[in-house]
Amino acid sequence: MAKAANLKPGQVLILLGGRFRGRRVVFLKALKNGSLLITGPFKVNGVPLRRVDARYTVATSTTVDVSKVKIPATIDDVFKREAKAKQKKSEGEFFEKKEAAKSTTPDSRKALQKDIDTPLVA
């Protein structure tokens, strides 16, 4: 298991858990909350820009040049979830079947993914 202090930006990691377990990803930055910022790049192996705890990774000796990648200073704000207003439901509304609205990736997140992945793939 990799420790965040021992990792260098551009180092290739292998994810041990979660949806993308077994995938090789590129380490970009250690975030303030202690998690790691990683990317696939998305076009290469389908892993998007995401946060991962260091205990779910294994470091490899392979590195990738990330000197051209510009990571915005407000990257922590990208991962914050919007607070939803809680509302009381009546008994009838509670048992009513409603189709859940399918969540989509915001255009700003897609643009950020493209901005970070373009220098990595080139």
Image (cartoon, helix red, strand yellow):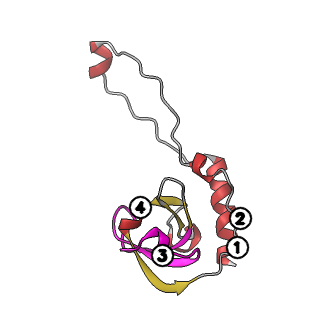
The N terminus, quarter of image = bottom left
Question: What residue is at 47 percent from the left and 58 percent from the top?
Answer: 34
56 sits left or right of 7 in the view: left
Q: Kindly check if marks 4 and 1 are in contact, taking CB atoms under 8 A apart as contact.
A: no
**Residue 6: numbered disc:** 3
Disc 4 marks which amino acid? Asp
**N-terminal label among 4 and 2:** 4
Q: Of residues 76 and 105, which is closer to you in this image?
A: 76
Q: Kindly check if marks 1 and 2 are in contact, taking CB atoms under 8 A apart as contact.
A: yes
> Within 10 angstroms of label 4, few (less than 14), some, or many (20 or more) residues?
some
The C terminus, quarter of image = bottom right
28 sits left or right of 94 in the view: right
Residue highlighted by disc 2: 70
What range of the chain is rendered magenta?
Answer: 1-28
Residue highlighted by disc 4: 53
Question: What residue is at 68 percent from the left and 54 percent from the top?
Answer: 73
Image coordinates of residue 60 in percent, x first then y, are 45, 83
Disc 2 marks which amino acid? Lys
